[in-house]
């Protein structure tokens, strides 16, 4: 540890089926957090690799051999990470761990300190998010074992959307089928919450207005905000609804799913793989799930995939504008939303009927405000920061804010 490494740090974890993303933060005074390092262990259980960047963006070295031989599952990944952090930031003490947990169910409208009772409750939600929730909770178990006594906070992707009107949350199936939690939840909530938290500083004129946030990454969704609160989201019961995504189709006629089962005789496992891993940009193009590859390709199928991505985004923006009864601003964020001027331009042009006029030069320069002066609806590009949101929640709930300025 060099002399600038603070003693007390918060560890932020986002555990998936084969990856463990992490970030380490130190308190920098009231509500301010300074990232010391961020990175991920990928290929857990197959060919593990760990990439870590320091605060200045420089790559930190990781002993590859030890990583490859020891990281056989999520628990081992966490053990390796903690050991590595202890060495790389010797002297730093992890005083709290904040987790991204995909599902908080119908009741959690804010993050919670993890207790055995909370953990039991969250485990009951595993059937609602089988691809994410077990891994998120597995990381909580692993921390309890590896860092006993260190308090943990669960930050939910669904929380920000709680409080939406009843019609926005409804899945219109018979009541007896809805009893076990069948409703629309919405996801990407930590990203939306972060954007909503910075709007008053970045764009005070629209912060209390009618805003659509477009989170366009590997997963993609829209959130309709009124006065900083979520009133609707394009993701619903699962993270399959709404916009076209990297490998997920977005909104689909449910009859298509019946056809996969009854017409094509696919198994539940095969249908799940089609819906989560083989559709969307990848399925349409047959080339890649990565927007960069598609933008660089001359293939007609790549163009069609981008056309559909833009078409669906514009269509859902129209729907969200209807929900809001008009629109004051649209905010682009996440991988595609932050980095692709071309996709932003095309979505804005398709939304011109709402009164949105793009400033082409500002958009090409990735400026924060990308709409033309005088545009009735303004447009913005704001980088998201879900890890910082988790660090803020963890610090606040554990009373760590300002502990280590
Ligand atoms: P996630 O966190 O869900 O994996 P990101 O928000 O990092 O997703 O977004 C990842 C996606 O962003 C990539 O799959 C890629 O398609 C897209 N992306 C990143 N940089 C660019 C770029 N310069 N131009 C176009 N798309 C980009």
Image: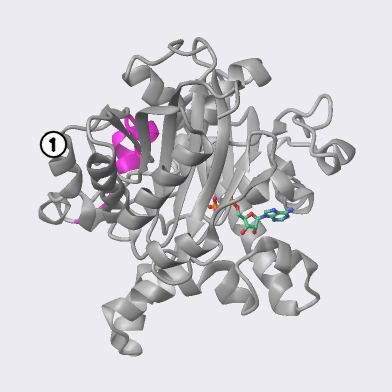
Q: How many marks?
A: 1
Residue 318, given in percent of the width and then of the height, sits at 58, 45
Residue 360 placement: quadrant: top right
Above-or-below relation of 324 to 279:
above
Q: Is residue 160 magenta?
A: yes
Q: Is residue 123 visible?
A: yes
Residue depicted at x 78% and y 73%: 297
**58 displayed left or right of 261:** right
Nearer the observer, 218 or 261: 218
Query: The N terminus appears in which quarter of the rendering?
Result: top right
Q: Is residue 209 magenta?
A: no
Residue 119, given in percent of the width and then of the height, sits at 18, 40
Above-or-below relation of 8 to 44:
above
Residue 374 placement: quadrant: top right
- Image quadrant of ligand 1? bottom right
Circle 1: element type: helix
Residue 265, given in percent of the width and then of the height, sits at 30, 89
Residue 181, given in percent of the width and then of the height, sits at 19, 48
Nearer the observer, 203 or 194: 194
Which colour scheme appears in the figure? one colour
* Residue segment shown in magenta: 158-173
**352 displayed left or right of 332:** right
**117 displayed left or right of 19:** left
Above-or-below relation of 131 to 304:
above
For label 1, the residue is 116
Q: Is residue 203 visible?
A: no
Nearer the observer, 237 or 134: 134
Residue lying at the far right in this picture: please name it.
Answer: 361
Query: Could you classify mark 1 by the number of other residues whose Cα lies within 10 Å: few (under 14), some (14-19), or many (20 or more)?
Result: few
**262 displayed left or right of 6:** left
Residue depicted at x 78% and y 53%: 342
Residue depicted at x 65% and y 30%: 329
């Amino acid at each position: 540890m060099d002399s600038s490494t603070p003693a007390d740090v918060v560890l932020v974890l986002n555990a998936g089926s084969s990856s463990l993303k992490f970030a380490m933060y130190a308190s920098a005074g009231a509500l301010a957090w300074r990232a010391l390092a961020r990175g991920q262990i990928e290929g857990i259980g197959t060919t593990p690799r760990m990439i870590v960047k320091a605060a200045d963006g420089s790559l930190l070295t990781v002993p590859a051999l030890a990583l490859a031989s020891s990281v056989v599952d999520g628990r081992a990944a966490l053990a390796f990470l903690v050991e590595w952090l202890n060495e790389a930031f010797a002297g730093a003490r992890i005083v709290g761990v904040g987790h991204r947990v995909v599902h908080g169910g119908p009741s959690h409208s804010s993050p919670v300190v993890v207790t055995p009772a909370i953990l039991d409750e969250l485990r009951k939600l595993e059937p609602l998010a089988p691809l994410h929730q077990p891994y998120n909770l597995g990381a909580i178990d692993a921390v309890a074992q590896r860092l006993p006594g260190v308090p943990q906070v669960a930050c939910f992707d669904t929380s920000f959307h709680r409080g939406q009107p009843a019609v926005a949350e409804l899945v219109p199936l018979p009541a007896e089928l809805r009893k076990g939690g069948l409703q629309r939840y919405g996801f990407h909530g930590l990203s939306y919450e972060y954007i909503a938290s910075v709007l008053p500083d970045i764009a005070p004129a629209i912060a209390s207005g009618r805003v659509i946030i477009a989170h366009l990454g590997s997963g993609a969704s829209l959130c309709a905000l009124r006065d900083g609160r979520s009133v609707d989201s394009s993701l619903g019961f699962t993270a399959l609804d709404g916009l076209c995504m990297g490998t997920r189709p977005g909104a689909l006629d449910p009859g298509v799913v019946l056809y996969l089962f009854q017409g094509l005789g696919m198994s539940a496992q095969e249908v799940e793989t089609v819906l989560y891993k083989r559709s969307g940009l990848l399925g349409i193009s047959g080339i890649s799930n990565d927007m960069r590859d598609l933008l660089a390709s001359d293939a007609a199928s790549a163009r069609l995939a981008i056309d559909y991505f833009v078409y669906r985004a514009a269509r859902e923006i129209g729907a969200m504008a209807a929900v809001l009864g008009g629109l004051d601003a649209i905010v682009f964020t996440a991988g595609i939303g932050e980095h692709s001027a071309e996709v932003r331009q095309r979505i804005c042009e398709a939304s011109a009927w709402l009164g949105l006029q793009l400033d082409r030069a500002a958009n090409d320069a990735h400026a924060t405000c990308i709409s033309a002066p005088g545009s009735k609806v303004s447009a913005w590009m704001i980088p998201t920061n879900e890890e910082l949101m988790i660090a803020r929640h963890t610090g606040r709930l554990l009373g760590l804010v300002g502990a280590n300025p």
